Amino acid sequence: MSAPVALDPTRSVLDQLRERVSALEGAPARLPLPTHPAVASVLGLRAGGSYGVDSASLALALAAGASQAGEWVGFAGWGDFGAEAAEELGVDLSRTVLVPEPGEHWREVTAALVDVLRVVVLRPPLAVDATSAGRIEARLRTRSAALVVWGEWPRCDARLSLEQVRWTGPEQGRGVLRQRRATLAVRRGTAPAVRADVLFPGERSALELVAPEHERRVTRPTRWATAPAGAAG
C-alpha cells in the first residue's frame, strides 16, 4: 500500500481535494489563474471556478488580472460596458470580447465564450436556475476557465462585495471626486468574511491594496465624500 500524500498546510484543504478528484477523473485540475494583485491577497482565481460580485468595479478587477497576463477575457450581458473604466482597471481591450445583449440566448453565449476564453464575466438578464448554472460550471471545469457573475448565481466558489465605500476629492466643499476607497469582503460558504482595504483608480493611480505602511504615511486628514462620482457644488 502506498503512503498517503500529505496536504499542503498553506493552501485550502478543499481546493487540494478537488484537484485530486479532478486528476483521478481525468479532468483538468483547478489550476491558479492570474489574479489582480489588489485582489490576490484575499482571493486567488482558479480554473473551473465561479465567483459572484456585487459591482461593475469588482467584475472588471477580476477580469483584469488574466487580461494583464496576456489572456483573452469576455463580457456578456453588459449593455453599458465602460471601456474607459475597464482600461483604468487593467483590462486590455485588444484581447476582449464583448456581447452586450445576448438576451434569451445568454446560456449559449456564455458557453461559447467559456470554450475559448480564460475568464468570462456574465451579467445574467434574469434569475438563474440551478440546472443552467450546473451545466455552465461543468463546462468551466472542462475548459479550465473561470466565470465571474455580476448578480445572483445559485452556487459560487466565493462572493465578493464592497463595503464602507468612500470617495475623496472635494476640499472645503469644492472640487471633483477623484478616488474611491472601500473594504473588499470575500465570503466562502459559511466561513467568516476575509476583508482588505482597496483604492480604486483616481487621477494617477490604479487599483491597489491599502497597506498599513500607506496608512502610517498619511499625515494630513483626508475629507471623504459620500456622494456619487461627479462634480461637487
Image (cartoon, rainbow, N blue to C red):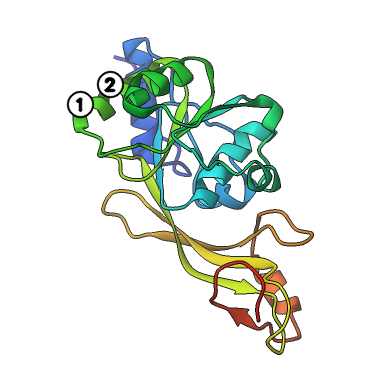
Given the current orientation, which residue lies at the most extreme top position? Answer: 26
Left or right of 188 on screen, residue 183: right
Q: Disc 1 residue type? A: Thr
Given the current orientation, which residue lies at the most extreme front position? Answer: 233
Q: Residues within 10 Å of mark 2 (few under 14, many from 20)?
A: few
Marks counted in the figure total 2
The answer to which of 82 and 162 lies nearer the viewer is: 82
Position in image of residue 150 (x %, y %): 41, 44
The answer to which of 112 and 174 lies nearer the viewer is: 174
Left or right of 210 on screen, residue 7: left
User: Mark 1 = which residue?
Assistant: 131
Residue pictured at 48% horizontal, 38% vertical: 78
Secondary element at tag 1: helix
**Quarter of image, res 186:** bottom left
User: Mark 2 = which residue?
Assistant: 135
**Quarter of image, res 66:** top right
Left or right of 216 on screen, residue 190: left
**Quarter of image, res 1:** top left
- The quadrant of the picture occupied by the C terminus is bottom right
State the separation of the CA atoms marked 1 and 2.
6 Å
Residue pictured at 70% horizontal, 48% vertical: 88
Position in image of residue 19 (x %, y %): 39, 25
